[in-house]
């Protein structure tokens, strides 16, 4: 795989702050996080102030990225996302039928940013492929409608996902070494890329990320509390209704 870049550890403290904020929120509202049905995994949450690990799949897993021009088109739109939509790109890999990214959008709206990336890249890819290649019913569709985005709460999680991204081509049997695979951020992450399409951000964080994450977690706590109380009130009303239905007729 190669050793982490010399400044890797200097990029991690922000992630440790993110973990601390998250754990404080869990401790404060542990009954809500632990017992309420809304305490689902934090998948696809629009959460500012943290990094997100994202996976997106081509519809029907068509191996369209075995063709270089398709890879170039996707990566051009990924770079446009960096520059035009305030989104830091930490690591990526483009596989034959899917992609993995680690991103930090400034506003935390990961759903919006991935939607932009999928929309713009789809237009490019449709233009590059034979007519009706992406036809799904009456419309062209390149990507699966769903995607998965997971917030990364700690330095360990960040490093694990970055290693996962860069080693993906090896696990898929495409290459024997990460150095050999062209369509990933490996060379950018561990040195300097020889292609602008492969650039990533060395500074992973926005200046106010800690404040944004703290505010977002407070809003999440309030949302969970309201939902918990609403569900509790509904259960109480059901119990009352059942009790009234069982009262004997005194007349």
Image (tube, rainbow, N blue to C red):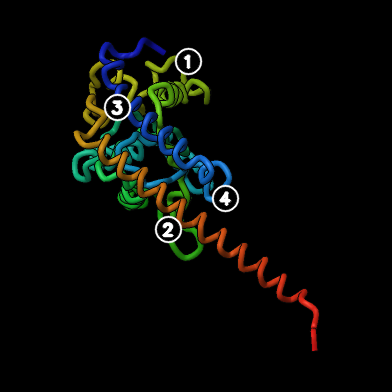
Query: What kind of element bears circle 3?
Result: helix
Name the N-terminal-most of marks 4 and 1.
Answer: 4
Mark 2–mark 3 Cα distance, whole angstroms, equals: 41 Å
Q: Earlier in the sequence, mark 2 or mark 4?
A: 4
Mark 4, other Cα within 10 Å: few <14 / some 14–19 / many ≥20: few
Q: Disc 3 and disc 4: Cα gap in Å? A: 30 Å
Q: Position of residue 57 (x, y in %)?
A: 47, 43
Quarter of the rendering occupied by the C terminus = bottom right
Judging by the rendered image, the residue that carries numbered circle 4 is 37
- Disc 2 marks which residue? 140
Residue position for label 1: 176
Judged from the image, the secondary structure of the residue bearing numbered disc 1 is: loop
Along the polypeptide, which appears first: circle 3 or circle 4? 3
Dot 2 lies on which element?
A: strand
* Closer to the camera in the image, 147 or 157: 157
Mark 2, Cα crowd under 10 Å, few <14 / some 14-19 / many 20+, is some
Query: How far is mark 1 from mark 2, CA to CA?
Result: 35 Å
Of badges 2 and 3, the one in the foreground is 3
Q: Residue furthest bottom?
A: 251
Disc on res. 14: 3
**Distance (Cα) linking label 1 and label 3:** 33 Å
Q: Residue 242, how many percent across, how many down?
A: 71, 70
Q: CB atoms at circles 4 and 1 under 8 Å apart? A: no
Q: Which quadrant, please, contains the N terminus?
A: top left
- The answer to the question of whether label 2 and label 3 lie on touching residues, with beta carbons closer than 8 A, is no
Is residue 112 shown above or below 205? below
Closer to the N terminus: mark 1 or mark 3?
3
């Amino acid at each position: 795989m190669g050793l982490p870049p010399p400044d890797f550890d200097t990029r991690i403290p922000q992630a440790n702050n993110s973990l601390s904020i998250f754990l404080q929120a869990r401790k404060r509202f542990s009954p809500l996080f632990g017992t309420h049905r809304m305490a689902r995994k934090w998948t696809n949450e629009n959460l500012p102030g943290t990094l997100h690990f994202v996976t997106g799949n081509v519809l029907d897993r068509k191996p369209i990225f075995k063709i270089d021009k398709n890879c170039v088109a996707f990566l051009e739109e990924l770079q446009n996302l960096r520059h035009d939509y305030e989104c830091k790109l930490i690591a990526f890999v483009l596989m034959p039928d899917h992609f993995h990214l680690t991103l930090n959008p400034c506003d935390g709206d990961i759903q919006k940013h991935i939607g932009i990336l999928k929309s713009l890249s789809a237009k490019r890819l449709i233009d590059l492929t034979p007519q009706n290649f992406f036809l799904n019913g009456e419309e062209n569709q390149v990507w699966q409608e769903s995607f998965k985005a997971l917030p990364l709460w700690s330095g360990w999680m960040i490093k694990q996902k970055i290693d996962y991204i860069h080693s993906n081509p090896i696990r898929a049997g495409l290459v024997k070494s990460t150095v050999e695979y062209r369509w990933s951020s490996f060379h950018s992450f561990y040195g300097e890329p020889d292609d602008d399409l492969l650039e990533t951000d060395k500074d992973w964080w926005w200046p106010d990320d800690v404040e944004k994450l703290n505010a977002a977690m407070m809003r999440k706590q309030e949302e969970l509390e309201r939902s918990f109380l609403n569900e509790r009130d509904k259960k109480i009303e059901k119990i009352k209704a059942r009790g009234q239905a069982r009262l004997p007729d005194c007349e």
